[in-house]
Amino acid sequence: MEINPIIKEVTTDCNLRCKYCFFAKQKRKRNRISIDILRTTINKICECNPDNQEIIFYWHGGEPLLAGIDFYEQAVDFQREFKKPHQKIRNGIETNATLLNNGWGKFFKKAGFEIGVSLDGPEEYHDEYRCYADGRGSFNDVMKGIGFLKDNEIEFSVIAVVNKKSVLSPKEIFEFFSSDKTFRLVNFVPALGIETGHGLSFECSVEPAFYIDFLIRVFDLWLKSSRAELKILPLESIIRAFMGFSHEDCRFTGDCTKSIVLESNGDIFACNTYSYGDFFKFGNISDDIEQVMNPEHSEKYRNYLEFLRNIKSKCSDCPWYKVCHGGCPGWYYLGNGNNILCKDFKRLFTHISRTLEKYNMI
């Protein structure tokens, strides 16, 4: 069994109150994962993976830095304790970067953590929705945090949320990231309206068509820029698929069975996209993982696999299937059985394929 855990709620708390954050819309208790659950998680993940397997632990929040350096030092100690002789363990963390300091920088450098920073673009666009509880923008603190990563020679990727404001300014957003060679990989993800149990989130969400228009414009700008080495997701993944290369972008691999999401109480979900109800909740980390994720023993896991099979049956005859493999199953879940981004992604695929054909790349 190959399982990479996304520890979604290292802590459910966050020092920001981003206006498009669906967790902020939910009335949840603000918890931090306990050391006991942390130990159990690392032990069982190492146990269920083969001896020669690479395991990636992804640390999310809330804001995961609120757990403190001691928490991650303990996690690394547990990984050393429980990993099998030939297992290789990597750690990735997604942070808003406002709490970064030199101490964090030294720890991440020593422990070899891969860092993802949430940054939506230049100050005007970032501060529109990524703000503190009192309404202050967080841009300057994020850039200060990035400075500590630079000081410690730590490379990082960027998660940029395309929202109602930024979607109208692809040129300004692209130029911001392409003008600074510090930025090596930028993942543009859409702020989609998501049902949270307390109404749809949010007034700053984007329509799928506008998001795809944004990506098409960014693609054209990237082709004309001098930063050919700048990786832009999901464009990079789509181009690689057209050219027959593999990639790790879960939105286009067609395989959502190699990762699990854990909440702070140890509950196991299929993916972050689904963790609003119990349909894709398989069990708890205290259970036997190989039983929980075995269709012969778990009705919920069996239902999940059937959900994935239904997507493939709907999409396998599509000429774009080789590129997207049906896309993210979460897009079907949010669309109640219909992929909310399918129609518009086809426009993007057409645009990219024509360009690649023009340059004899496919």
Image: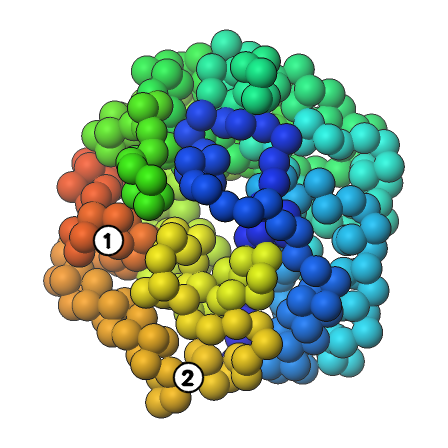
Percent x, y of residue 138: 61, 19
Relative to 122, is 219 above or below?
A: below
Q: Residue furthest bottom?
A: 296
Callout 1 environment at 10 Å: few (<14), some (14 to 19), or many (20+)? some
Q: Amino acid at mark 2?
A: Asn
Q: Residue 85: where, in percent of width, then height?
A: 77, 80
Q: Which mark is residue 294?
A: 2
Regarding residue 126, the answer to whether it shows in the image is yes
**Residue drawn at the location 55% of the way across and 83% of the way down:** 288
Q: How many marks?
A: 2
x, y percentage for residue 303?
Answer: 28, 74
The answer to whether residue 357 shows anywhere in this view is no
User: What crowding class fits label 2: few (fewer than 14 Cα within 10 Å), some (14-19), or many (20 or more)?
Assistant: few
Give how far across and how far down residue 216 sits, in percent.
30, 28
Instruction: Tell me the residue that label 1 is attached to.
Output: 332
Tell me what residue is drawn at x 50 percent, y 27 percent. Answer: 18
Q: Secondary structure at mark 2?
A: loop
Q: Earlier in the sequence, mark 1 or mark 2?
A: 2
Measure how far apart labels 1 and 2 are at the Cα level: 23 Å
Tell me which corner region of the image, top left, top right, bottom left or bottom right, holds residue 90: bottom right
Q: Of the residues shown, which amino acid type is indicated by label 1?
A: Tyr
The residue at 83%/64% (across/down) is 77
Q: Is residue 24 left or right of residue 60?
A: left
Q: Which mark is residue 60?
A: none
